[in-house]
Amino acid sequence: MVVELFLDLLSQPCRAVFIFAKKNNIPFEFKHVELLKGEWKAPVPVGMNWVEEFGKVNVLKKVPALKDGAFTLAESIAILLYLSRKFNTPDHWYPSDLQKRARVDEYLSWQHTTIREKGCKVFITKVLVPLILGEPFSPEKLETAVEELNSALKQFEEKFLQNKPFIVGNEISLADLMAIVELMEPVGCGCDIFENKPKLMEWRSRVEEAVGKELFQQAHEILLNVKNLSTTQLPPELSESLKQLLKP
Amino acid sequence: MGMELYLDLLSQPCRAVYIFAKKNNIPFEFKHVELFKGQHCREEFGKINILKKVPALKDGVFTLAESTAILLYLSRKYNTPDHWYPSDTQKRARVDEYLSWHHTNIRGNAGKTLWIKVLIPLFTGQTLPPEKLQEVMDELAISLKQFEEKFLQDKPFIVGSEISLADLMAIVELMQPIGVGCDIFEDRPKLSEWRNQVEEAVGKELFQEAHELILNIKELSNIQIDPQLKEHLAPVLRKMMK
């Protein structure tokens, strides 16, 4: 039985897992969990009753999730590391050299509450909140979100990237992969955070090339067409519960 | 030159690193970075960790930030017992899974109790309304429920029958509310039992030693706060007080 990966490519960590698996020719079954159809929250009637199973795959009801036989796993970092070990992927993804490996760990740990959190906030402010509330986005809130992300990006460039081609030396690693998918999220909603940042732009080009332009495009297709989301109808129960979450 | 660990035991991730190093007899020089004195904001510390946060490690010319990275580095360099970060692929994945989820769930919420009950009053002279604390406790309750349902379940430790880095990172974080009088173990027997098991696995004496500062935090109400630190924290404080 092949590994099952429960993914929605709108989600940054899902893209990291998707790209990693594809790039390394890891055989898997793509189980599409459509976030905007609320498939992570409630069973979808008729024809999709495997989704009830999703809660059994990941009781936290988040994507990405992995199922390998009876073994289920949540959290993209855990999934990436698991896949790298099980399928013995090339060393540069998670170098065996102690210090290089520590640098990858360092970035993966730091990014949760910085790049990831602030990148999400930009997307949520510009796309999701308007979608849920049916109102235009708040320019002030967006400005604040972008400022916070830029602050994190400054630290990213100063501490993690510096003058190196990749976060850890000369080759792409899980650190670059997790970073790039997060930073594409604001791009996908029209906030080009790479603009006027030549070093970051160069790093992005290198990462895209290391991944492979075709695979990179494929993984980001849904995101880059996110303007089509404005006409998406959220299922009413999902809409209601998300509105509750957004209450100040 | 030996390995240096830059720590303040008021900080949860510092306690995890401290306990781990001590428990495994890892030789290190304890470099005290006193957060209340704003020592982490200084240029000198910035050379060790440009992010100006503790814990930080210096091993020769190699410097490292982030407690998870430090713990993993130490476990590998010093070849610590397998149970801390099991070589079994699936058990190891379970530790990774917890360590990842921890950041935005247990870690975010548990620490806020210290801010609301002690730090904000200390820095601003203002006490926050009880609703603020209740908000944080409610959110923490949700994380604790997920912790018990998903990560602990009916096992003695997060990953099977022995303590791992996952339990260590969790326990130090959950001791933060204890230090300020929010007993999150009360009325949670399973969690309480897990706590006892973790304390025993660490060793009661070492556990107490690591937690002495936080468990006596109320005595710090007379402490002089470094003015530069107050200024540095002003935006963070304002945000938390909203």
Image: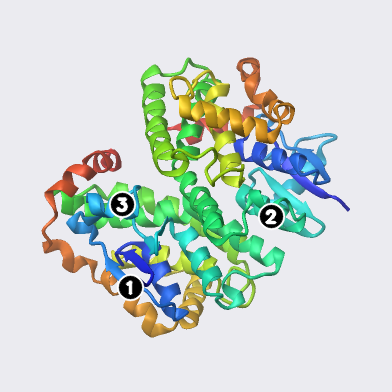
Q: Which secondary structure lies at badge 1?
A: strand
Q: Residue at x 35, y 47 (%)?
A: B51
Mark drawn on residue A243: none
- The residue at which mark 1 appears reads as B29
Q: Pinpoint the chain carrying mark 1.
A: B
- Is residue A97 toward the left or the right of residue B32 in the image? right
Quadrant assignment, res B14: bottom left
- The residue at which mark 2 appears reads as A73
- The residue at which mark 3 appears reads as B47
- Amino acid carrying mark 1 in the image: Glu
Give whichever of discs 1 and 3 has the lower sequence position.
1
Quadrant assignment, res B241: top left
User: Can residue A147 be spotted in the picture?
Assistant: yes
- Amino acid carrying mark 3 in the image: Lys
Question: Considering depth in this image, is A161 or B142 the residue closer to the camera?
Answer: A161
Q: Pinpoint the chain carrying mark 3.
A: B
Q: Residues within 10 Å of mark 1 (few under 14, many from 20)?
A: some
Horizontal and vertical percent for residue B100?
55, 53
User: Can residue B214 be spotted in the picture?
Assistant: no
Q: Which secondary structure lies at badge 3?
A: helix
- Amino acid carrying mark 2 in the image: Leu
Q: Residues within 10 Å of mark 2 (few under 14, many from 20)?
A: many
Q: Is residue A115 above or below residue B205?
A: above
- Is residue A140 toward the left or the right of residue B226 in the image? right
Viewer-side label of 1, 2: 1
Question: Considering depth in this image, is B148 or A176 the residue closer to the camera?
Answer: A176
Horizontal and vertical percent for residue A239?
59, 28
Estimate the spatial distance between the alpha carbons at disc 1 and disc 2, rounded to whole Å. Answer: 38 Å
Viewer-side label of 2, 3: 3
Whether label 1 touches label 3, CB < 8 Å: no
Horizontal and vertical percent for residue B157?
58, 73
